[in-house]
Image (cartoon, rainbow, N blue to C red):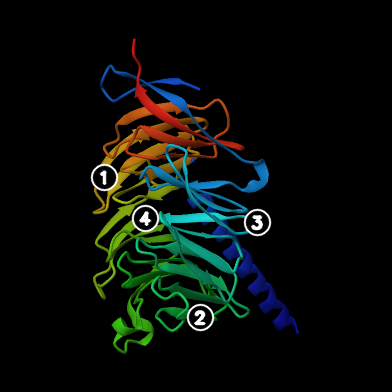
Amino acid sequence: MATKKRKKKRSLTRIMLFVALILVVVALFQNVAVQLMGGESNTILQMTATDVEISYNFDTRATFYSSGNRTFFFATRDGLQNIASTGDLRWQYSFNMNQPIIVGNGDIIAVGEPNGQIIYVFNNDGIMYIANLLNPVLYYTINAVGYLSVIMRTHVGYEIQVFNPANPEDLSFGYRAPINDSNVFPFSVDVSDCGTYIAVALLDVETLTQSRLLFSYVRSVDSRGIPDGLIASYSFPNEFIFRVRFVDCENAIVITDKRILGYFAGQTTQGYNWNIPLHNRLDQVYVGSNIFAYVTGDRLLNDPFAEQPNMLRIYDFDGNLTGTYNLNGRTTHLSISNNTILVGVGRTFYAINSQGTELWNYTAIQDVLDIMLLDSTDTILLAGNTQATIMNLAPVTE
């Protein structure tokens, strides 16, 4: 009886650890007029509100997404709207969710909610398909052409499944992996842009905390008899992978608590192609369409190479540093659109290019939930607690 109680206690502890780590990922992954200076120019810029405003109640769970193509998605508990930067409603779709969460990749988004069993996939023209899940969802991503990858909780463990945008109801289409080991937690998953590969990050707490990274084929036809379609497996002792993200058809970026690495999915022995050691904790990290960036947090204990906190570091997808920027304050927001980094320190937001040059900054007079570019640099959506406003950046005539 004592043995059973100890096993039950260990199982509960592991579940609590997994839930805590999920919250870490959510925290990492979940943006008036003011005078601005543009680069080294003496041109004075000003951000001014347009007549386009969207109002909503505080409890509607309003959330936004834009790929910078002069449109944006606006989701609440009652459904989704696609709106042009002029404020015109392009289309809308109704659903009921307690806490809608938008996950986007380019012009495609997936909308679900924690522990829900349905995910809607949209592009700029409307609904692409509906994924009906057999179990509650814990985590999901969408790739650039609409492949949805999902981690679900089952009554005996977890299951990972990929939905084919061409036939989402075909459950035998390809990758579908149950995980019934109580010591193993799937933590992050992503499908490559062409739908060929899937990357899975696992946390194993059997004897010590270690992560595993798996690359497999998505489609059964590509596996050619390989068990589970597995291409390569890598171990990370005493290291935690909290995010894996494909950046094209074959290359993936892997983010751990100790480094950021670049992998080629088709390799079986070589391992990573580049490696960026982390000497500080990650305060914020974001992977864009052509670059990625992170903000340094507290120094790692006894690390002689630790940097000062609050430093923005920008890299290309070959792992090359392209720019830095000293933020002089704790970061509250980080996102990338059209190769422009938007970073917030309290109520002040900075637009920074990939070389680390400040393009403009803006200080809000109220709390800001989200900020995003609707085009290259001069149209911005600013979302607060109960209202979102489209703002323009333009030279001031003196």
Spatial CA distance of label 4 from label 1 is 14 Å
Vertical relation: 105 (above or below) 129 = above
Query: Between marks 3 and 4, how big is the CA–CA gap?
Result: 36 Å
Mark 3 element type: loop
Which circle's residue, 1 or 3, is located before the other in the chain?
A: 3
Q: Is residue 74 visible?
A: yes
Q: Could you give the CA–CA distance between mark 3 and mark 2, rounded to whole angstroms?
A: 28 Å
Q: Which residue is mark 3?
A: 98
Q: Identify the residue position indicated by label 2 in the image.
A: 178
Q: Nearer the viewer, mark 3 or mark 2?
A: 3
Three-letter amino acid code of the residue under disc 2:
Pro
Looking at the rendered structure, the number of numbered marks drawn on it comes to 4
Circle 2 Cα neighbour tier, 10 Å, few/some/many (<14 / 14–19 / ≥20)? some
CA distance for labels 2 and 4: 29 Å
Residue 19: percent from left, percent from top = 60, 62
Most distant residue in the right direction: 1
Q: Is residue 149 left or right of residue 254?
A: right
The residue shown at (50%, 39%) is 332
Q: Mark 4: which amino acid?
A: Arg
Q: Earlier in the sequence, mark 2 or mark 4?
A: 2
Kind of residue at badge 1: Leu
Front-lying residue, 70 or 347: 70
Image quadrant for the C terminus? top left
The first of marks 4 and 1 along the sequence is 4
Per the model, the C-alpha gap separating discs 1 and 3 is 41 Å
